[in-house]
Amino acid sequence: MAFSTGGRINTNVNAQQAYSALNAISREHGIHQLRLATGKRINSASDDPSGYVISKKMEARMRAMTSAVDNVGDAQSVYGVAEGGYQTIADILVTIKEKQARAANGALGGNELDAIASEINTLASEIDDIVATTKFNGVSLFSADASGNKYNVNFQVGESSLETLAVGFSADVSSATLLGSLPLTIPTLASDIAALTPDTALNTLSGEIGKIGAAVNRLTIKETNLTTAITNTDAAKSRIMDADVAKEQIQVSKLQILQQTSTAQLAQANASPKNFLSLFQ
């Protein structure tokens, strides 16, 4: 670093050095003030190039995982709608089983059997209505589409596009498949009612509901893991990106003092050549 005695007034080296020091302090002071204003340690790539790149990658991970959490929620909603449909059908099958047991009564006449058969036919029609109207976002969950395909879709449930979970319902739960020959008609009502298979149908539905329960539990675990991963990634990103407010305030206070002292020294350096004017008196 160059120094001058002050005798050469054409170039005031001391003033230039004080001015350079004041500029450097002011720049650094501005950086710390910006960090306090934004709460971020890195406000541009030049502040910390590698830290900026790493933090952006972490941000991308968090956004992907946040979307995956939303996907998990939608998958749970699909399962919830399907479970509701299955449970309603199961309730109807229990009622049909009750009517079937009631029909196995030798004291009943033709009119009574016809009334029971009519009720069972109505309940079976309601099962088919449930199959047709159980939908999510307008897509049927139990009925096949125009190509004959049942509901079967994938949900991304992780950061990577390869982390997917298939959600589908392949079981045929129409009334004809669950119960057998319908509708019930005269003249063989008693034997036709007895031939219905509500017990087998209930076993089928119980199996499907059990699968849904296991899948929902699995999704709940994934949701918990994703939420934990998001929190941990956010904490790691914060250590890189966010400013330590207490530390930054200490730096600002120090730099404010240095600004004052460097400004005073610049004023003195500018005034020092005046001392040599006495030589001309």
Image (cartoon, rainbow, N blue to C red):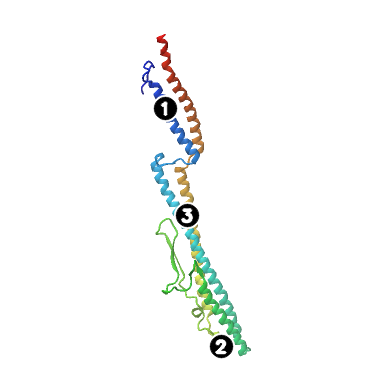
Q: Secondary structure at mark 2?
A: helix
Q: Nearer the viewer, mark 2 or mark 1?
A: 1
For mark 2, does the 10 Å Cα neighbourhood hold few (<14), some (14 to 19), or many (20 or more) residues?
Answer: some
- For image coordinates 44% across by 18% down, the residue present is 271
Residue at label 3? 66
Alpha-carbon distance for marks 2 and 3? 58 Å
- For image coordinates 42% across by 47% down, the residue present is 56
Q: Position of residue 53 (x, y in %)?
A: 39, 45
Q: Nearer the viewer, mark 3 or mark 1?
A: 1
Query: Identity of the amino acid at label 2?
Result: Leu
Q: Residue furthest bottom?
A: 187
Alpha-carbon distance for marks 2 and 1? 105 Å
Residue at label 2? 189
Disc nearer the start of the sequence (2/3): 3
Query: Identity of the amino acid at label 3?
Result: Thr
Query: Identity of the amino acid at label 1?
Result: Ala
The quadrant of the picture occupied by the N terminus is top left
Residue at label 1? 21
State yes or no: discs 2 and 1 in contact (Cβ < 8 Å).
no
Residue 174 drawn above or below residue 61? below
